[in-house]
Image (spheres, helix red, strand yellow):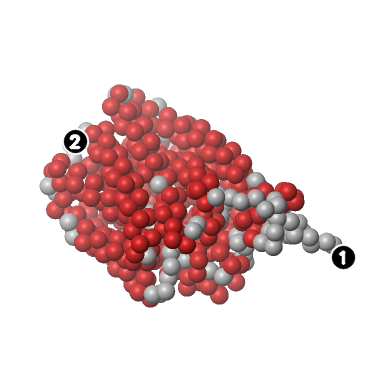
Amino acid sequence: MQSTTTYGGAGAAPITHPNSGARNINARDAHVDPGDIAVGVVIGRSAEYFEFFTYAIASALVFPAIFFPWADRLDATLYSFAIFALAFVARPIGTVVFMAIQKRWSRDMKLGISLLMMGTSTVVIAMLPSYSEIGATAIILLAALRIAQGFAQGGSWDGLPSLLALSAPENKRGWYAMLGQLSAPLGFVIAAGIFAFLIAYTSEEDFLTWGWRFPFFVAFAINVVGTFARLRLASTPEYSRLLDSHHLDPAPVGELVSKQGSNIAIGAMAALASYALFHLVTVFPLSWIQLYETRPMDEFLHIQMWGAGLAAIAMLISGIVADKLGRRTTLGTAAALIALYSASIPFLINSGTAGQNAFILIGFTLLGFSYGQAAGATTSNFQKQFRYTGAALTSDLAWLVGAAFAPLVALGLSAHFGLGYVSLYLLSGAVASLAALSLNRKLEIRD
């Protein structure tokens, strides 16, 4: 009979575990501090968010002119946002496919392939010819590469955010959950800063010809660094032992949905207000200013960067508040504040520069407070064998329902019916969050 000797204590996986790998043989009783896990999460996700915001900003400021020059400015931007949403549609499919790759081979193999695909897709976008050069083929290629980005994003789930949540001290789970989310404002500040610099110091012709491509090359370089950092971290014996001891391995999707599908739905809905707000203060305002205002875009990007700084501060506060009042209460409070904020959208955006600045700064602050506790809303509620896959699909669904079509819907509604409908759109997300939290009063947000 084959031996199943367990190394590294009772919690470690046996060396015959299909996903543990031979590296577990050396995983004795090494301790991994939650702070070390948090550093790994921030490094890995910062590269992803920078890549994410690079495409998001370009989809509002560049792609309408480059790939849809035959359409009027509004329709061109709507077409660009439709392609932007494709990544979020492909993401859960990528999650399922790459889970199968991990189950068949290893977590390292899955991460390596997905991160390589993501980086390659990003750098190829930087080299795409325009519509004026190759016609509709340019649009098809852009859409295909955007789908590839989302597909790869689904495979980049390494389980470290869940591991951080499950390894954090009981009275510090809100704080540690927040740390991983700090990657979002960091990634936005870097991406927006590069675009603001290029817009300010290049002519419009140069920016639309070659300037916009530079951030994508930077994103590729950062992706390479982030890839090696994540692979180095995720493949160490200590992390492998912890991942296996928490049963953070792929589970059959059909069985997960049939047995714990409600946790996926409730987890995604509980964070819906935050995810809806995410693109309403980052991507949508860029398109609105581009279409209907005359203020300098680099100046507006600077305001958004200040907003991202406020979001980071609000995230820190959310970690403190969540550990004192509970994460469910924190999310509910944030959703209620977002609901109140939604009513002010038409007034602020139509109030000139001061009102628009207030819209951005207040919105980013609320985003930080809510998004700091919004990730992986039901990780702790999943049965052990479903935690890894359940947390990934919960995140995928939250992005798909809450954020994927937010720029497209918000711009379409505001352009054709007025900004009041954007208020209703955001309000619906806040109501959905409050309803989800009410449906499961025992829900504890631990990821």
Residue that label 2 marks: 295
- Above or below, 171 against 364 in this view is below
**252 on left or right of 359:** right
Extreme residue toward the left, this view:
351
- Label 1's element? loop
Residue 277 visible in the picture: yes
**389 on left or right of 431:** right
Count the marks: 2
Q: Position of residue 110 (x, y in %)?
A: 63, 49
Q: Position of residue 124 (x, y in %)?
A: 51, 35
- Above or below, 84 against 125 in this view is below
Q: Residue at x 46, y 32 (%)?
A: 218
Q: Position of residue 286 (x, y in %)?
A: 28, 43
Mark 2 crowdedness (10 Å alpha carbons): few <14, some 14-19, many ≥20: few
- Kind of residue at badge 2: Arg
Nearest to the observer: residue 80 or residue 376:
376
Nearest to the observer: residue 242 or residue 298:
242
Which quadrant: the N terminus? bottom right
- Above or below, 265 against 70 in this view is below
Extreme residue toward the right, this view:
1
Residue that label 1 marks: 1
**226 on left or right of 85:** right
Asked if the residue at tag 2 contacts the one at tag 1, i.e. Cβ–Cβ closer than 8 Å, the answer is no
- Label 2's element? loop
**44 on left or right of 287:** right
**Mark 1 or mark 2: which comes first in sequence?**
1
- Kind of residue at badge 1: Met
CA gap between label 1 and label 2 equals 74 Å
Q: Residue at x 33, y 72 (%)?
A: 435
- Above or below, 349 against 5 in this view is above
Q: Residue at x 62, y 56 (%)?
A: 242
**For residue 302, which numbered disc appears in the image?**
none
